[in-house]
Amino acid sequence: MRTTALAVVVPARDEERCLPRCLSAITQAADLLAERNPEVQVSVTVALDRCTDGSGRVVRNHHGVGAVAGDFGSVGRARDEGIRYALEQFENEPGYLWVANTDADTCVPRNWLAGHHALAQDYDLVLGSVEPRWEPWERDSVLAQAWATRHRLAAGHAHIHGANLGFRASSYLEAGGFAHRESGEDVELVERLKARGARWCAVDSVRALTSARTRGRAPAGFADYLRRLGAETRTNSEKSLP
């Protein structure tokens, strides 16, 4: 089905420091899509969840970005509220709308929206790859090496990341949307979409860079995974010592 509009949705809870870089990257991706496909509509919505910092101010100061704020209480609900708010701004039928999801601590590549738009012509669900954004002093660390060993960044990868996830709006609504849970909402939704027969692909062509922090906002989220991987790697290294 031909896709004529894209809605970008970003959940955020106290992400004043990360949001400027995130939104700038999304703007660059929207600009490239406009150059290639000027007829395609794009909206960007940040779902502000119980923010007590300047996240709202960052969004207000970023031209062309909308926001929905509330006491959502979980990343799953924040994503869902953001998507439903964004879709209300379009007059298009949901079958012609594509939802591109990312996170506030993530930077998407310049070809992100153009890539999602191209894939949306043939698929209902796109699983994009994500790579930690290591600081220069972290790139050769034990954690970075352990992560690289466990993650295959190539087409057909087996990973699911809410920070780089796209789907047709009609498929999302028919599947019931993101569950209102603190973590794992992305995996659970993808499983439901696949079970409903969604045409899907896993790609590395629109790889996003996400924070390599080990203390994040969502319990059992990506930051928690990195923390546990680091602890496991250090334990295994100690066991191997003579």
Image (cartoon, grey):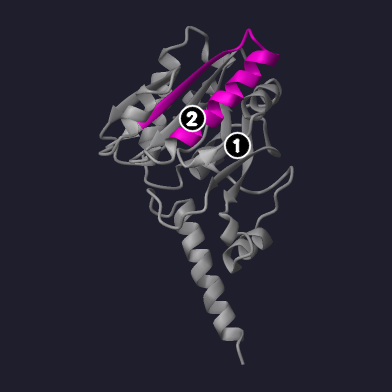
Please give the label number shown on residue 63: none
Q: Residues within 10 Å of mark 2 (few under 14, many from 20)?
A: many
Q: Residues within 10 Å of mark 1 (few under 14, many from 20)?
A: some
Q: Is residue 26 above or below residue 91?
A: below
Q: Residue 169: tell me if it is visible.
A: yes
Magenta-drawn stretch, dominant element (helix, strand or loop): helix
Q: Is residue 27 above or below residue 104?
A: above
Amino acid carrying label 2: it is Leu
Label 2: state its secondary structure. helix
Part of the protein shown in magenta: 20-47
Count up the numbered dots: 2
Amino acid carrying label 1: it is Lys
Q: Quadrant of residue 69?
A: top left
Q: Nearer the viewer, residue 28 or 6?
A: 28
Residue beneath disc 2? 23
Residue 194 point in image, percent of width and height: 60, 37
Q: Quadrant of residue 71?
A: top left
Q: Nearer the viewer, residue 109 or 231?
A: 109
Residue beneath disc 1? 194
Residue 222 point in image, percent of width and height: 49, 52
Residue 75 point in image, percent of width and height: 38, 40
Q: Tell me if residue 44 is in the magenta stretch.
A: yes
Image quadrant containing the N terminus: top right
**Mark 2–mark 1 contact, CB under 8 Å?**
no
Image quadrant containing the C terminus: bottom right
Label 1: state its secondary structure. helix
155 with respect to 3 (left or right): right
Identify the residue at horizontal 34%, vertical 40% (top origin). 13
Identify the residue at horizontal 45%, vertical 17% (top origin). 64
Q: CA distance from mark 2 to mark 1?
A: 30 Å
